[in-house]
Amino acid sequence: MSLSGHVVFITGASQGIGRGCALRLAKQGAAVAVAARNEEKLNDLVNEITTAGGKAAAFPLDVADEEQVKATIKAAIAQLGKIDILVNNAGITRDQLVMRMKRADWDAVLQTNLTSAYLCIQQVIPGMLKQRWGRIINITSVFGQMGQAGQSNYAASKAGLIGLTMAIAREVGSRNITCNAVAPGFIETAMTEVLSEDFKQNAVKQIPLGRVGTTEDIASAVAFLASDEASYITGHTLSVNGGMLMG
């Protein structure tokens, strides 16, 4: 599944799933534009990729800021020539029961997790349409499919990404552009690291494969959807959850 000659733009790339995707796609030959708020971690990632013989560039970005999104993607295209694969991965949580949830926490999660994907898609679509080839991959969540108590904002944002994925797939399919989503289950990342040991053990009991997932598990799914092998798949949500949710 060579991605040689392609340029990828990944949000939330400084750690976790985004970082794993950047390493995997670079290994398969893509030039990788990595974007996130933490510039130091981005530079470390770029160094790791280039040391291994890959090509990467860092772009500090707060995806919640529309003007930053526009300027950063413009800069990435200027530096790398194009963007023909977009991975919308940036995400945050602000967990609370809905009756106690502050409006600011609702807005922050929807803006970062959902609105940013729309903004990034809007900026890369013109180039993809012109070259008549593109891959858009949105990282959603099993909780966008089944809900989760205390995460109404997060679940809503991730469910919204699934709807966005299908709508974009219908809009741009005729131009050889696919739009798919990957829905991770329980994955070992900095976001899940803070959860209690009891919660983690109970979560594993609900997973038929009997283990938590890794960032590599998600990166493999993203790499497949970005490749020519997935050229007849669009509007699809690929669940990578160890069997936590089926159907």
Image: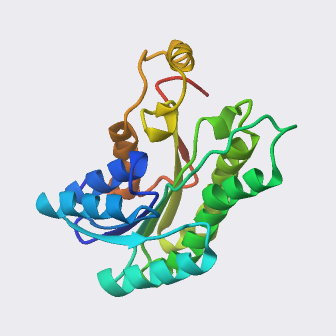
Q: Nearer the viewer, residue 240 or 40?
A: 40
Residue sitting at 75 percent across and 40 percent down? 152
Which image quadrant for residue 35?
bottom left
Q: How many marks?
A: 0
Q: Is residue 127 visible?
A: no
Residue sitting at 20 percent across and 62 percent down? 47
Tell me residue 148's x, y (percent).
70, 31
Residue sitting at 46 percent across and 84 percent down? 74
Residue sitting at 12 percent across and 57 percent down? 52
Residue 108 appears left or right of 213: right
16 relative to 176, above or below: above
Q: Nearer the viewer, residue 127 or 175?
A: 127
Tell me residue 44's x, y (percent).
26, 59
Tell me residue 226's x, y (percent).
38, 57
Tell me residue 100's x, y (percent).
84, 39
Q: Nearer the viewer, residue 169 or 211?
A: 211
Residue 166 appears left or right of 223: right
167 relative to 205, above or below: below
- Which quadrant: the C terminus? top right
Q: Is residue 162 visible?
A: yes
